[in-house]
Amino acid sequence: MKKGRIQRIVLVTGLMALCGAACFLAGKKLARAGQEGGNAETTTGNNQDVEGMETAAAGNQNPVGPGATGDSQNPEVPETVGDSQDPEIVEITAGSSQNPEALEAAAGNSQDVEAAESSDDSMRESMAAEPPLDTLEFGGDPADKDFYAVKLPDQIFERMQGKSYKKDCPIPRKDLRYLHILHKTLDGGTAEGELVCHKIIADDLLEIFKELYDKNYPIERMKLVDDYDADDEASMTDNNSSCFNYRTISNSSKISKHGLGIAVDINPLYNPYTKKVKGKRTVEPAAGEPYLDRDGDFPYQIDEDDLCYQLFTDHGFSWGGAWNSCKDYQHFELDGDKADKLQEKYK
Ligand SMILES: [Zn+2]
């Protein structure tokens, strides 16, 4: 061989060797790269598993979170509903709040609850036909929910203790009746009235007050005299109509007809009691003095043309405005045998 050819062969062989070595190295590198990729995938898989665990952990937290939130929100809302006397109020409050958190805040806010109760009260006041005591609770007829008489419920009897029903009161509780009525006010509105009387006039009073109501006869106020601590002057000054109040007649041991529960005072401020004692005129209530002039032009005035006078006298009552020794324009009391027997029993 020629030297030049030998050199080329060596060169080509060297190149081929280099090329092979390069290919070998490249294959090794690719193989390592493949291993690293596998490792990477495995690592990725491991990462995914960790993320999965984290998600699971978050999933575990989430049930705790909403659960806790649910525990704190849900019971509070129904409790508030349960506490409210008028579910409609709460429904309106709940309906106006689209955000549960806001609802929770509202439910937990005592001022909002008070506001709801306040609305409840004002709604109740405007619903004058609703009796202050549940008729059905005392065995009354639902058809007579506006005008009814029942034996004294415990809460009424308790309300009277030491006031209209004093310690030495000989009238047994079983002989007294609690009356619920409706009456018209001067502005044409309807108001609820309550009154305690003796059972022998309960039906008469229901009939009388029903007719006064139907004929739009105005009575300003009718609540138990116990709300004035049985202070008759205070009750009369407030123009409060009332019946039973256990007491004896002034300067006497004789029980008054109010003490027996068989006398009724109507619109007393405008129909005062007056008597001349030794030339000096007394007026009860004192604030009723302007209304002693029975020719004056003022509301609630009772005279013999008055519907109240006509109905009471039709039912066997006499009117204090017709008396001679004194005038008691507000006063109607039962006369006749029944009244006499009762007075005889407790004299
Ligand atoms: Zn009277």
Image: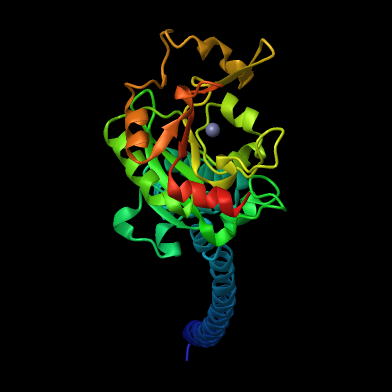
Count the numbered circles shown: 0
251 sits left or right of 93 in the view: right
Is 43 placed above or below 249 here?
below
Rendered view: 341 above or below 280: below
Q: Check the image and tell me how it is coloured.
A: rainbow
Q: Is residue 302 visible?
A: yes
Which quarter of the picture shows residue 299? top left
Residue at 59% x, 73% y is 64
Question: Is residue 105 at all visible to an observer of this figure?
Answer: no
Q: Judge by depth and name the residue closer to the eye, 345 or 8.
A: 345
Residue 65, percent across and down? 58, 68
In the displayed structure, 67 sits above or below 292; it is below
Rendering quadrant holding ligand 1 = top right
Query: In screen coordinates, is 208 left or right of 265?
Result: left
Q: Position of residue 159 (x, y in %)?
A: 62, 50
Which of the two residues, 234 or 75, is positioned nearer the viewer here? 234
The residue depicted at 54 percent of the width and 75 percent of the height is 59
Residue 85 in picture, x, y percent from top left? 48, 54
Q: Nearer the viewer, residue 86 or 263?
A: 263
Q: Quadrant of residue 150?
A: bottom left
Residue drawn at the location 71% of the way across and 53% of the way down: 168
Horizontal and vertical percent position of residue 257: 55, 41
Q: Could you tell whether 15 is left or right of 233 in the image? A: left
Which residue is at the front of the view, 14 or 79?
79
Outermost residue, bottom side: 1
